[in-house]
Every structure is written in C-alpha cells, then in structure tokens.
Image: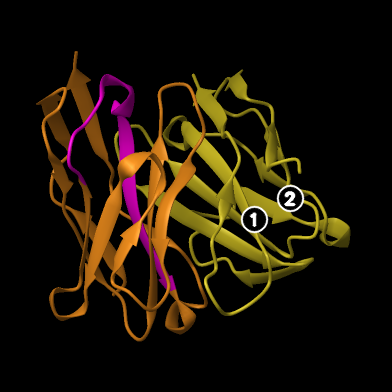
Amino acid sequence: EAGVTQFPSHSVIEKGQTVTLRCDPISGHDNLYWYRRVMGKEIKFLLHFVKESKQDESGMPNNRFLAERTGGTYSTLKVQPAELEDSGVYFCASSHLGTAGNTIYFGEGSWLTVV
Amino acid sequence: AQSVSQHNHHVILSEAASLELGCNYSYGGTVNLFWYVQYPGQHLQLLLKYFSGDPLVKGIKGFEAEFIKSKFSFNLRKPSVQWSDTAEYFCAVNGYTGGFKTIFGAGTRLFVKA
C-alpha cells in the first residue's frame, strides 16, 4: 500500500512568489490534514478535509494560504504571495474516516524556503 | 485550550542507558494518545498509540508508554537505548471533543552516543 506522498520535497522561492504543494493521501482515506513545522517549533495544525469538504481550517495562518481538495482525492496547498515567515516543513497526513482510534499517517513533508 | 507539553527538548544518552520522555496533555474528553518518531532524513512514523484498555502500551523497537489519566500524562520509555534510536520524538493527542484534530508537542531530540 502506497503511503502519503507529497510534492515537491523541497522548494526554494523568492518572497512574493507563489508555491503550490501537493499531497496524495493513502487510497481510501477520507481525512486529509495539513500541518506545518517552522524550524525548531512544534508541528502546527493547518486544516482538515473530510473528502472534499473543509472540516476545520482554524489553523490556516492568513488568507495567503489556500487549500483545496477537488474530488476528495489529492489536495493542494497554495501560498500566494509567499513571505519569509512561511518557510518550514509542510506535512500532509491522512486517515480513515471514523471515530475510534484516528491514527494519521504522514507524508515525508515538503520543505519550503522563502528567500 | 488543547495542548501537549513535552518536558525535554534535547536528551543525550549513552547506549544501553534507559530512556523516559515526558509528555503531558490538556484535552477535554476521551483522548487517543500517540508517539511519533522522525529519524534523520525520514518522515514521521507512528511509534505507538493508546486508544483504550491497558494503559501500558507497547510499540515498535522496544518502546512502551504508560497512560496515567489522573496525571494527564503519556510518558515514553525504553529500558536500553541504541545508537539507532537517535531521532526526534513527538507526543500527540486527539479526541472526539476536538474533532479528532491531532495536537502535537514541540518534540524531543534524542541523541544516543555510541
């Protein structure tokens, strides 16, 4: 079974540019999450999709961040325009829909550096 | 507010030493608890998890954790660490109250000296 895959693995962009990160969850997983870790700090929740619907986007930093999950399969996270403080590792995770033991499985992360 | 607190940010041990990493959480209602590990250059992996039942859970690679409800704690232990346990360890919690949004601690970097 393929795991959660993320693309690109690394991205270096200039301040003001746009970056789009992609996540392909484990097949059959309706829950999809985006997390971010800024250097040395905790892994912070950004948002949660259930299928194609945004269940919780309380962690999105501001309106420069836009996440979509068309068709309830893969998801994209766009940062436009990027700022220096957006640098960090963006993790995607997925899990089965259900109420018991919601274990989430992570991708390898997309390292974003804004210069 | 929902939160997870990991007591140590950096731990250095010699091989064969015993390990205990502290984790305390604040989360209303029934919780699920996890420890994730990230080895150098690799992605986050599940080490062990607690949902219900025996509060002492065993995970991969000889790790175990004990859920103490009265203390809101879920400490990770290993009797004898190896050099290959060098990694960053994250405690995490989720539950129905929070819509199963998983909250992570800041992580503990463990370095094991050979």
The three-letter amino acid code for the residue at tag 2 is: Ile
Gap between marks 1 and 2 measured at Cα: 7 Å
Image quadrant assignment for residue B65: bottom left
Q: Report if residue B30 is visible in the image.
A: yes
Q: What residue did someone put label 2 on?
A: A26
Q: What residue did someone put label 1 on?
A: A94
Q: Chain of mark 1?
A: A
Give the residues drawn in magenta, as a range.
B78-94
The quarter in which the N terminus of chain B is drawn is: bottom left
Image quadrant assignment for residue B26: bottom left
The quarter in which the C terminus of chain B is drawn is: top left
Q: Earlier in the sequence, mark 1 or mark 2?
A: 2
Q: Give me the chain that's yellow.
A: A
The local secondary structure at tag 1 comes to: strand
Categorize mark 2 by other alpha carbons within 10 Å: few (<14), some (14-19), many (20+). Answer: many
The three-letter amino acid code for the residue at tag 1 is: Ser
Categorize mark 1 by other alpha carbons within 10 Å: few (<14), some (14-19), many (20+). Answer: many
Please name the residue shown 28% across and 47% down the image. B106
Q: Nearer the viewer, residue B78 or A96?
A: B78
Disc 1 + disc 2, Cβ < 8 Å: yes
Query: What color does chain B have in the rendering?
Result: orange
Say how the picture is coloured.
by chain
Q: Is residue B81 magenta?
A: yes
Q: Is residue A96 magenta?
A: no
Left or right: A112, with B103 as reference point? right
Left or right: A5, with B40 as reference point? right
Q: Is residue A55 above or below residue B75?
A: below
**Position of residue A105 measured from the top left corner of the image (x, y, whole percent):** 58, 50
